Amino acid sequence: MPPCATVSGNTSTCHRSRALNPSPDPSPRAARLSAPPPAVGLWRLLRPLLFRLDAERAHQLGLLVATLSPPSLVERIGQGGATADVARAPALATRVMGLDFPNPLGVAAGVDKDAQAVTFWQALGFGFVEVGTVTALRQPGNPRPRVFRLPGDGALINRMGFPNAGADVVATRIERLRQEDALQVPLGINIGKSRDAGAADAAADYRRSFERLGELADFVVVNVSSPNTPGLRDLQTVDHLRGLVDAIQTPNQALTRPRPLLVKLAPDLGDADALACARAALEGGCAGLVISNTTVDFSAARMDTTGMSGGLSGAPLLARSNAMLHALRQALGDDPVLIGVGGVMDAASAAAKLAAGADLIQVYTGLVYGGPGLPRALLRGLLAQRAAGR
């Protein structure tokens, strides 16, 4: 499939050709796979059954189970009888953006768009949770089917288009969690442009979402890089980003405690464009960046993607995402916060993401293939590597 793909018969998803050259990655997951990545624990039995379902239907079923599962029971099962919980190991704790993270592994945006199962994710061992992408008003997203598995690549292709319940519904859920003091890890909220908002209205649209959600978040991620909303990636220019960040910073700075803002960029940006966007965001007072979103370049996929469109995530994205992450860290220095996402499937790929310059890392596709046992298995691997001095 060519790098530029059409989404739902609308505009091209290709914003700019990618100029970053992926550097070799030490993780074995960077290699092309001929079988799905290993599942962890009981997921070995459940995954084949769930994979018989449409990918989005399986995800919705998983969310339903997550909302019904008592967090205390999930946590006990996840620890497997261990006296000390690896998810709370002091050696993995980190402080970023003035926030305390029990470990650097988080749930990426897209897993829980409407903040339905936040306590479940923290019970699985995640050190932080990012919900969304949320838009100002409820919207249905693109027509189905819109999520596709590439098992031989350990990958997904999605063209969701930000289906979500809207800022008011998500805010009500998070308000309840705050009132119940149910949150034990930092919570990020990812906000995006409504499909019907044109470029001229984008800044006001983001501002509306922030005004409803910002004070409920520990940090806010501004998504300008999904390939599945027409015109969204066009906001990845210096002028557009400056206006957008300024519009959000106005209500943000009026808060008693302004929230850290991060901008999520696409891996398909050229290196000069990515750096220019990053600097524009930082000059506007953002704390950092999320690197990266999904890619519209399917060339790293081994399985046939003929006729597919949307954004590719998972193992084939690791090298490309890490190259962009490394380039930005080298150019920007140590101060900006960089959250690395894209291709984290196991402890080796997580370590590679951290080595490329990430302060924190996130997983989405890895959770689909690895299952609920993945977070603590991954953290055990990271902890063992640190104990060995690697």
Image (cartoon, rainbow, N blue to C red):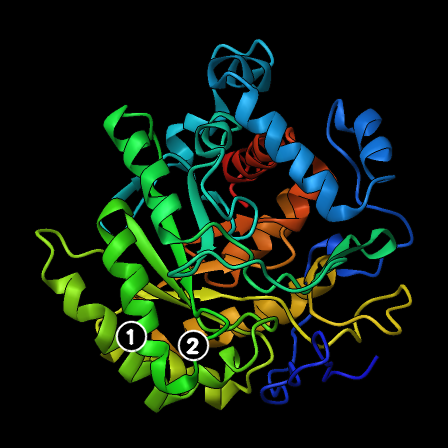
* SS for dot 2: loop
Q: Quadrant of residue 51?
A: top right
Please, is residue 222 above or below residue 33 in the view? below
Nearest the viewer among 79 and 206 is 206
- For the point 18% across and 62% down, the residue is 252
- Taking the image as shown, residue 100 lies to the left or right of residue 229, namely left
Residue 143: x, y in percent?
70, 63
Q: Which comes before the other along the chain, label 2 or label 1?
A: 2
Amino acid type shown at disc 2: Ala
Mark sitting on residue 197: 2
Residue 250: x, y in percent?
15, 70
Question: Which residue carries the number 1 mark?
Answer: 204
The reply to whether callout 2 and callout 1 are in contact (CB within 8 Å) is yes
Please, is residue 303 above or below residue 110 in the view? below
Amino acid type shown at disc 1: Ala
- Taking the image as shown, residue 353 lies to the left or right of residue 213, namely right
Mark sitting on residue 25: none
Q: Quadrant of residue 319?
A: bottom right
- For the point 12% across and 51% down, the residue is 257
Residue 314: x, y in percent?
69, 57
Nearest the viewer among 367 and 57 is 57
Q: Is residue 101 visible?
A: no
**Quadrant in which the N terminus is drawn:** bottom right
Q: CA distance from mark 2 to mark 1?
A: 9 Å
Q: Is residue 51 visible?
A: yes
